[in-house]
Amino acid sequence: MASLLRTISRQGPSLWIRQISSTSVNRSDDISKALKQKEAPIVDAKFTLLKPEEQAQKTKLAGVIEVPEKVDVSPITGVPEEHVKTRRVRIYVPPKNAMQSGTITSKLGN
């Protein structure tokens, strides 16, 4: 391996580029063939090994459930609908006490 590296280093960087470059890039007919060739379809890995009936079941479960009529949830929650839709709520988080300002550095060591 060492002798190979010595040989390559003596011959210069122009030889490296020639040996590394691909022949398909230099030939225009290979590029035209590659552009005409069709690729395989992308298949989701979750469904690849499933049986057809398992696949159908998973697609059914992934769908949206449609409810035929509007459901009134106010008896369940106890809050009237007009309060739920028009109510504005401000969430207040009080700032840390000045004595707790250095707690972040002590938690990093754990």
Image (cartoon, grey):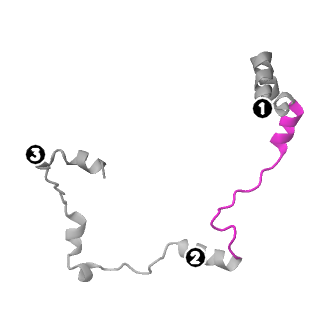
Instruction: Tell me whether the residue at label 2 lies in contact with that at label 1, contact meaning CB atoms closer than 8 angstroms.
Output: no
The residue lying at 23 percent from left, 69 percent from top is: 84
The residue lying at 87 percent from left, 30 percent from top is: 27
Quadrant location of residue 71?
Answer: bottom left
Q: Is residue 38 left or right of residue 62?
A: right
Residue 39 painted magenta: yes
What amino acid type is highlighted by mark number 1?
Met
Seen in the picture, residue 80 relative to 17 is either above or below; the reply is: below
Quadrant location of residue 70?
Answer: bottom left
Image x and y of residue 87, in percent: 19, 63
Q: In which quadrant is the N terminus drawn?
A: top right
Point out which mark residue 47 bears.
none
The residue lying at 61 percent from left, 78 percent from top is: 57
Image x and y of residue 19, in percent: 82, 27
Q: Mark 3 points at which residue?
A: 98
Viewer-side label of 2, 1:
1
Q: Which of marks 3 and 2 is nearer the N terminus?
A: 2
Instruction: Work out how far the residue at label 1 is from the one at label 3, CA to CA, in angstroms.
Output: 64 Å
Q: Which of marks 1 and 3 is nearer the N terminus?
A: 1
Give the farthest residue toward the front: 2
Q: Name the residue under label 2.
A: 60
What amino acid type is highlighted by mark number 3?
Ala
Image x and y of residue 104, in percent: 24, 47
Residue 89 painted magenta: no
Instruction: Work out how far the residue at label 2 is from the one at label 1, CA to CA, in angstroms.
Output: 58 Å
Quadrant location of residue 93?
Answer: bottom left
Start and end of the magenta stretch? 28-51
The residue lying at 24 percent from left, 48 percent from top is: 106
Q: Main secondary structure of the magenta part?
A: loop
Q: Name the residue under label 1.
A: 1
